[in-house]
Image (cartoon, grey):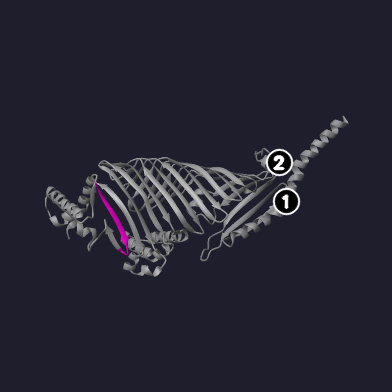
Amino acid sequence: MVVKKWLVVGTLLGFGLLFFVLPILVGLALERGYPLVFDDLEERAEGRFALEASLDRGLLDSTGEILIRMVSPGLDAAPLRLRHAWAHGPLPLSEWWAGRIPIPPVLTVVRIEVDPEGIAGPEWLAALAGRPLAQATVRVNFDGTLDVEASTPAFATADGQVTSEGVRGELTVQGGIRGARGKLDMGAFGFREGDRGLGVESAEVRFHGIHNDAGSRVEGSFEVGAARLGGRAGRSLQVDPSQGIFSASRAHNELDDSSFTVEFGDARIFSSPPDLSDLSDAVHVRGGHLEFEAGSGAGRLHRLHGVFSVNALAWGEATAGPGLVRVELKGMDLFAAADFSEALGELDASAVGDRPALEAEAQLLREWFPVLVADSPELEVKRFELETKVGRIEGEGWLRVDGSDPSVFAEEMTALAAIEGRGQVALPVPLMQRWLEAFLTPVVEAQAGGLPREEIQAMTVFLREMAEGRLLETGMLRLKDERYHAEFRFEQGVPIVNGKLLGPGGLTALLTGG
């Protein structure tokens, strides 16, 4: 009986240790380590943001609040407020009382809520109806790993500008941040502002990453449901469900490598809203492949290699495909490109009417162009080919802008002298004839007055035959294997085609006989 008595007493003491003593010790350790963690985070922030943290330690659980305030000249944004509650392990009673039993035992469980007050507009606050903007649960395990679950609620603003069925994510971080794996599931999402908008049926992303002495790397895959994007002038893009893979890496010398590959479904580009049945002017891309590989460092793009292929293209009654293009871009200042994009977005948001907006955009580009090309960017089309009903289009080319002297861009002639390029193209004869007729038809219509359509077409064919003859006689086109071939160069502001200088009036004068 004595043995059983001490066994019972020992068991009770053991449970008391688990449920009361160890949680108190965890709380004391949390109180001591909490400010050290945020001091380290502020040091790593390097002045980009400021942190204010508070912790109210209890015996079995603790509560706290974190304020994250961005530090930027001219920026007076409300701080991001995170409320968090810590349930002390290894068997946190507050979790048990809430019906959540952590198995296996954990060091602590942290529940975080993002307060929308101050960072979300009145419409969002009304749609959230008192709910947090986001929630997360972090399990801190004894082996140093972290298990994170995060979610955002489903909501819709009263004006219908934003709708979301919520986002849910899971993340497991290995001890010492040696690696991580996770997934992100997004429900249907929609955003609309005037003629512009974005709609996605669903999306899922899975990823895993590693971190060691050599650097960091992350790889993953994604699936995206049907998506719709509306742009300016009523243009819209609609893409069927797609999937792909991605990867990114960073070495300790801050050289980054990344890649992105997607196999996309059918896509349609049209000027009518997607709910209209008349899509006769739509461009239909019947499946394809998109791939990017990039290397960058210290805000500079060292290289960007891209591949884009399509299974088939259709617009109206015309069809083409398959097709392929390979491009490579070198020497781009990514920071300057990002600043220019931001300036363009601000200009676009304040524009009223199309023509003033176009003029303002042209002026903005003139101001930014010397900055954008300061690293002397190069663009090379390594390969272009597209099958058509009448034959294959093939081409390649190279273009470089010498941005070493910004002053040359003050005048048009000196700016053109800073541009150098070369390339070649081969076109099927029937396709070239069709393009020439499309170019000459407006010229004939402007001069023909009220002539019947048949006579206008006959005059266009006659002028096209004359233009073809001039292009062949002057050597601007060469006929080989039922295709027209042209090699072109651009040197010191002078265009050269098949070794011949393009005279005054350019190509237009040559085609019209002017």
Q: Alpha-carbon neighbours of circle 2 within 10 Å: few (<14), some, or many (≥20)? A: many
> In the shown orientation, is residue 261 left or right of residue 94?
left
Q: Is residue 317 magenta?
A: no
Magenta range? 483-493
Question: What residue appears at the point 84 percent right and 31 percent down from the top-left corner?
Answer: 4
> In the shown orientation, is residue 248 left or right of residue 370?
right
Q: Is label 1 in a helix, a strand or a loop?
A: helix
Question: What residue appears at the point 42 percent right and 40 percent down from the top-left corner?
Answer: 241
Mark 1 or 2: in front is: 1
> In the shown orientation, is residue 428 left or right of residue 362?
left
Q: Alpha-carbon neighbours of circle 1 within 10 Å: few (<14), some, or many (≥20)? A: few
Amino acid type of the residue tagged 2 in the rendering: Leu
Residue 45 spot, x, y in % from top left: 59, 59
Gap between marks 1 and 2, in whole Å? 16 Å
Front residue of 413/32: it is: 413
First of labels 1, 2 by sequence position: 1
Question: What residue appears at the point 36 percent right and 67 percent down from the top-left corner?
Answer: 409
Residue 273 visible at all? no
The residue where tag 2 is placed is: 91
| Quarter assignment of residue 19 | top right
Q: What is the residue that sits farthest to the right in this orientation?
A: 2
Question: What residue appears at the point 27 percent right and 52 percent down from the top-left corner?
Answer: 486
Residue 207 spot, x, y in % from top left: 53, 43
> In the shown orientation, is residue 411 left or right of residue 129?
left
The residue where tag 1 is placed is: 29
Q: Quadrant of the C terminus?
A: bottom left
Q: Is residue 491 magenta?
A: yes
Q: Quadrant of the N terminus?
A: top right
Amino acid type of the residue tagged 1 in the rendering: Ala
Magenta residues: mostly which secondary structure? strand
